[in-house]
Amino acid sequence: MERWRENVPDDFRFCPKIPQSISHARDLGMNGVEIKLFCDAIIELKEKLGYCFMQLPEGFGPRGLGILKRFLEYFPKSIPLALEVRNPLFFTIGEASADYFNLLEEHQIAAVITDVAGRRDVCHMRLTCPVTMIRFVGNGLHKSDYTRVEDWAKRLKSWFESGLQSAYFFTHEPDNLLAPELAAICEEKFREAVPGLVTRGPNEAAGRQGTLF
């Protein structure tokens, strides 16, 4: 961990993904040692630790909210967490959706927003704390990708003006070969929309990522 910390810029932040041995366990890992092992390891990132990312399986639905509540009470408050759910019932208008987002807000957990063309319900646009995490899935730099990026630039500008403190914006492509280029496009558009915005894009870290391994 020390070597990783030393080989990234001062304002770089790692966002470790919680392993499936925790996120896909029936008890979310609360009855084992996995959570402690994970947290003990990533806390060594110290000031370079950003938000952890936990992606629950699609089969995890509203019936699991009780388990999720216990997990959020159990998980160390010293480690910032962003959570992604994929069960469609969490995004329908009703009690399940309200209970889920209220739970995240109560524990100051960031609700992951996923912008993917094939499924629009996961692009829910809900903010549950002053930090958001967005996973943007492109379509091979199709012209629609540029339109969606411009829309995000406007939305982030509005959110920052309304009190948003930080946004973790991750770009994905079908084969991920174009993900760095997509990230550079996002960085350019976001800086244009939000004067003074501090970003950590691919151009500034070019040539250094390989030194992490």
Image (tube, rainbow, N blue to C red):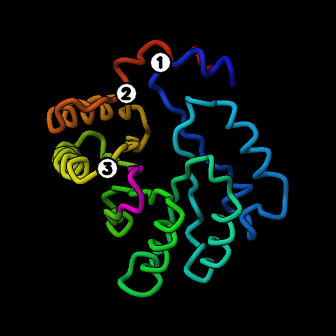
Residue 200 highlighted magenta (yes or no): no
Question: Which residue matches tag 1?
Answer: 9
- The quadrant in which residue 97 appears is bottom left
Q: Position of residue 96 (x, y in %)?
A: 47, 83
SS category of the residue bearing label 3: loop
Q: Position of residue 129 (x, y in %)?
A: 41, 58
Q: Amino acid at mark 1?
A: Pro
Q: Looking at the image, is mark 1 or mark 3 nearer the viewer? A: 3
Graded by Cα atoms within 10 Å as few (under 14), some (14 to 19) or many (20 or more), the crowding at tag 3 reads some
Residue 181 circle label? none
SS category of the residue bearing label 1: loop
Q: Mark yes or no: residue 74 visible.
A: yes
Estimate the spatial distance between the alpha carbons at disc 1 and disc 2, rounded to whole Å.
9 Å
Q: Are marks 1 and 2 in contact (CB under 8 Å)?
A: yes
- The quadrant in which residue 46 appears is top right
Query: Which is nearer the N-term, disc 1 or disc 3?
Result: 1
Quadrant where the N terminus is found in the figure:
top right
Quadrant where the C terminus is found in the figure:
top right
SS category of the residue bearing label 2: loop
Q: Position of residue 179 (x, y in %)?
A: 38, 34
Residue 200 circle label? 2
Name the residue at 34% across, 66% down.
124
Q: Nearer the viewer, residue 199 or 74?
A: 74
Boundaries of the magenta span: 127-134
Q: Amino acid at mark 2?
A: Arg
Q: Are marks 3 and 2 in contact (CB under 8 Å)?
A: no
Name the residue at 33% across, 55% down.
115
Name the residue at 17% across, 32% down.
195
Q: Looking at the image, is mark 3 or mark 2 nearer the viewer? A: 3
Q: Amino acid at mark 3?
A: Leu
Question: Which residue matches tag 3?
Answer: 164
